[in-house]
Image (cartoon, grey):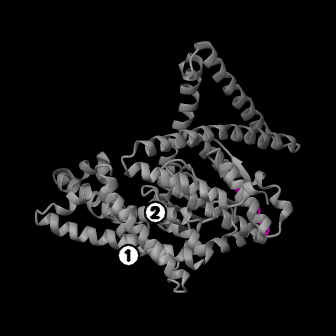
Amino acid sequence: MLETGRVAQLFFLIVICAAVVYFVETARRGKMPKLRKLPGLDAVEEAVGRATEMAKPVVISTGIGGLTDVTAPQTVAGLSMVGYVARLCARYGAELIAPARMPYVIPIETEIIQTAFNEEGKTEEAARAAEMVHYLSDSQFGYTIAYLGILQRRKPAAHIMVGGYWAESLQLAEVGFSVKAIQIAGTANTHQIPFFVAACDYALIGEEIYAAGAYLSKDPVQAGSVAGQDMGKAIALVLIVVGIFLTAAGIPVLTDLLRS
Amino acid sequence: MSFYRKKELPIAITAFCAILAIFAFYFKVPEAKSASTTVQTWMLVMVNFAVVVGFVMVIKMHKRRIDKRRPGDKSWLFSAWLIVVLIGYVLLGIYGVESTRTAAPTNDWTFNWVYNNGVVALDSAMYSLLAFFIASASFRAFKARTKEAGVLLISGAITMLYNAPAGSAIFGPLAQNFNDLGDWILNVPNMAGFRGIMIGAAVGAISLGIRVLTGRERGYLGAGE
């Protein structure tokens, strides 16, 4: 019935899901987990405020990943951030520019921005949501060069990047730095994280981008899911420590079990 | 608000597709695998239709830029050129399909020539710019202001020398020891850090997935709850 080699995977998926559901239910009953401070997310409002004061635009992108592959969670995390930033832009009256790489992300981003502006009572601007989303190119470097052009021409005061980024990450971050934008960037692509750390004012590392939605919404139930996430990490940690000792002792039980 | 724009329906579709894909991945049920493949094929078809949306948006955006051109500002010429190239390349693709009587324009010599000598060359040029950006970012990052930055500076310098032929030349008879140190930095502390981030990101993606499937995470559907 079960696929060979995926039994352990399924088991741990169920365990982590159960932990997340348990903490969500606990939070729903009123026991709010404490989330550690994420300066990168706290700085978003300040960045949008700065852009408003300087009468310069806010540029936000969700990376070059799509919604149909393994990078989809990163894009979803980025879209959550677009919703939050769009709402802040609507509230403060800042101009928003959202460059997009994947054509099918355009209607989603447009809808998100439109909803955000409508909810802030800016119906006139909401009607122009489609103009805020700039489809650039499906090609990675075609997108990059057009994005760099926007940064150079428009000189945004705030530049936010959350999603899946590859080789273009440093190019975007460096040009953002050169135009003196306050930069907040996050990705789960491990090879790009050092670039964001080096070139941006605030960096969200790996899992922090997935917690962004929960952190920003202040919703106790979403925060509960982040506590469940920590339980998953604790399980991984225990497996690593036990695995080190068993493997050192020449007992391959755990590795065999994980391969089952 | 009309029914199709409500958030419940998109959440239900997302949950159904995700549960189907997960079930088909873990269980040997041919019907589930077949249904999952069908859903994925639908998804690919829908995604490709979205290219038309992108095409129209690019044309509209650059047409607007041309319409709003100001005296003395020549940047509208780039927009005009982009529209010409975009439409020209689509026509070339159609010509390629027609001339070779195949489904792919890449079978056509002209289309391939333009792609290999235009798109590929421009892509490579853009990619190569990364080297200069790495240099400028490293210059800022490698400043030993704190202990942590000092460790980064030392390990970064060792890794750079380890990767460059200059490292072996500088260290002469000790080059092998130096290479071992470079290997150790890459494979032990660096790898440990990477794996920690990867485990955290994987668990975070599962947690986000559960929030999306249960409709708790609605940011991707619009900012509101």
Please tell me if label 1 and label 2 are on a single chain. yes
Find disc 1 in the rendering and name its residue.
Answer: B147
Which element is circle 1 on? helix
Q: Position of residue A68 (x, y in %)?
A: 53, 47
The residue under the point 57% across, 35% down is B122
Residue beneath the point at 53% across and 19% down: B107
Say few, some or many: other residues with alpha carbon within 10 Å of mark 2 (under 14 / 14 to 19 / 20 or more).
many
Q: Which amino acid lies under the numbered mark 2 shown in the image of this protein?
A: Ile
For this view, does B105 lie left or right of residue A22?
A: right
Which numbered disc, 1 or 2, marks the residue that appears first in the sequence?
Answer: 1
Snapshot quadrant of residue A53: bottom right
- Tell me: A187 left or right of A51: left
Q: Is residue A177 visible?
A: no
Residue A248 pos. (x, y %): 13, 65
* Residue closest to the far left: A250
Callout 1 amino acid = Lys
Residue B167 x %, y %? 28, 51
Q: Quadrant of residue A254?
A: bottom left
Quarter where residue B79 is shown: top right
Q: Which residue is mark 2?
A: B206
In the image, B47 versus B156, the foreground residue is B47
- Provide the residue span drawn in magenta: A93-97
* Residue in view at x 52 percent, y 44 percent: B129
| Picture layout, residue A184 above or below residue B52 | below
- Kindly identify which numbered label has been placed on residue A149: none
